[in-house]
Image (cartoon, rainbow, N blue to C red):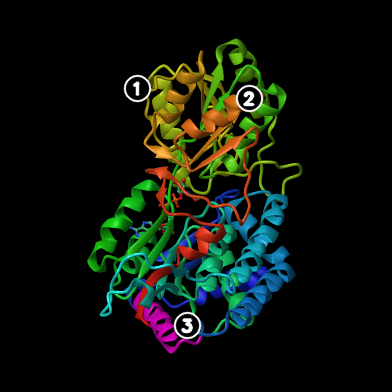
Amino acid sequence: MTLQSVLEDIRKRPGTGEVIPVIDPVTEEQITEFTDCGEDAVNEAVAAARTSFDSGIWHTMPGRERAKIMWRIADLMDEHAQELAELDSLNTGMPLAQAQMIVPTCAEFFRYYAGWCTKVHGSAYEVQMQGGVSGAYADMHAYTLKEPYGVVGLIFPWNGPVFNACAKIAPALAAGCSSVVKPAEETPLSALLLDRLIHEAGVPEGVVNLLTGYGHTAGAALTAHPDVEKIAFTGSTEVGKKIVEASAGNLKKVMLELGGKSPVLIFDDADLDMAIMMASMGIFVHSGQGCVCGSRIFVQRGVYERVVDGIATVANNLKLGGPKEDGSMIGPLISAKQLNRVMGYIHEGKSDGVEVVTGGHRLDRTGYFVHPTVLTNVDPATSRLYQEEIFGPVVTVLPFDSEDEAVALANDTSYGLAATAWTTNLSRAHRIAKRLQAGTVSLNCQLVFDHAVPFGGYKQSGWGHEFGREGVEAYMQTKSVWAQL
Ligand code: NAD
């Protein structure tokens, strides 16, 4: 399947809503377009998922057979890795090399979760209470079964299109669920190819159903649908709250992976060269469009000037550009809307007296590029750009004196997705790891990930976990069975 055929196929997808343009964020030109699928398509997709689930065609298939199909998906993704990478690179503007690095990791979601198809099980219990007709606890037996929820809706954003899709589809398949998948309206292209590969690998019809449409139309209809048992959502905290409200109709279960305003603490005993480089990349990579990006950096006073200068130097040396431009390290923001949002925060900060160490402006060229921006002299109590997730290449740097002050600053946020500490003091590192209110804490490292390690947010950064055993169990419910022997 060529890239061109994906661009053409998406135009042919049936729909009843608005025509949605797909824009190249590097050229600002339209790549292709598609029609919002509309509510009828949502109902059809949910009905197809329901029929496939009730037929048992997938969830009653022996785990080892489902695992083989999931391995085939991964193998097909490897075969089509270049096209998947090109589609994501074209659609998001990220450097092709970055997309090429990410796609194999995405394929591994299917191999990793293929293993769980044969390994998720319930438990048997030693019954402690007296009960049953005989009144003798020795005559009772209790055990649990792990069962797939049924029909699940998978909704995710544009910042890593293939990655976000695989992170949800693979565990849902391993659990035995039938799913309705809605990628972001900005980045539907790679999802089309992935959907093809999933079916080519042998996943039966109706088990995975792709919807292409807006969030407020297709996403909202899916979330409110009475025949969907669970929504797994990745996106903004704002939309996460809407998902919770819309789910109330049938009290469907909800898993949320939401936004962050992640702190990075740099102590004066840290390996400063490494800390400066990683803290810089930890916010500027992908133009800051990563949920775990460390957008609030706190530096111990004695090394504050050196770290601010170091981060500004890295920011000034990063080459921004499109996938086809030589030496591009960082791509653009995804859309004009996102560009306006990011620049809005920067303009507001400037008028509030924030000091711009570097950046603070859009590049003087075509494309939604914002110069990596380092801001100081920010008031944590009043500054919106300090308190709210910007999702752009914008970092605030503030000094601290003591460990207690650093922890207090780090935790002073409604978010709790990730946090980092740079220090060579081992005791302090682990002490801080316990005190930081975040679902993921990185010690002397940033931007780390493994399919096996659970990931989820504290506070308003989410509900539940993805990846690892928790990731597949998120798509399963627990049934307790009692038996009188
Ligand atoms: P968004 O919340 O606007 O959209 C995410 C998805 O939800 C899209 O597919 C969109 O179409 C859909 N959607 C929008 N409105 C909806 C509604 N009313 N009902 C149902 N679906 C709806 O997020 P975004 O701006 O596209 O993405 C950026 C956000 O995603 C950031 O906040 C970022 O932190 C977050 N994110 C979180 C993680 C994580 O794992 N915690 C990972 C990546 C991105």
Between tags 2 and 3, which lies in front? 2
Q: Which residue is labeled 3 in the image?
A: 206
**In-front residue for pair 276/360:** 276
The stretch in magenta equals 42-57
Place of residue 448 in the rendered image (x, y in percent of width and height, measured from the top left):
63, 44
User: Does the magenta stretch mainly form a helix, a strand or a loop?
Assistant: helix
Task: Give the side of residue 439 with respect to residue 319, left or right.
Answer: left
Q: Residue at x 49, y 22 (%)?
A: 406
Q: Secondary structure at mark 2?
A: loop
Pick the quarter of the image with the C terminus.
bottom left
Q: In this rendering, is residue 290 above or below 303?
A: below
Q: Which mark is residue 423?
A: 2
At which x and y percent is residue 107? 66, 65
Q: Residue at x 38, y 68 (%)?
A: 127
Q: Is residue 51 rendered magenta in the image?
A: yes
The picture quadrant where one finds residue 218 is: bottom left
Which numbered disc, 1 or 3, marks the residue that appears first in the sequence?
Answer: 3
* Mark 1 neighbour class, 10 Å CA radius: few under 14, some 14 to 19, many 20 or more: few
> Circle 1 is placed at which residue position?
381
Q: Residues within 10 Å of mark 3 (few under 14, many from 20)?
A: many
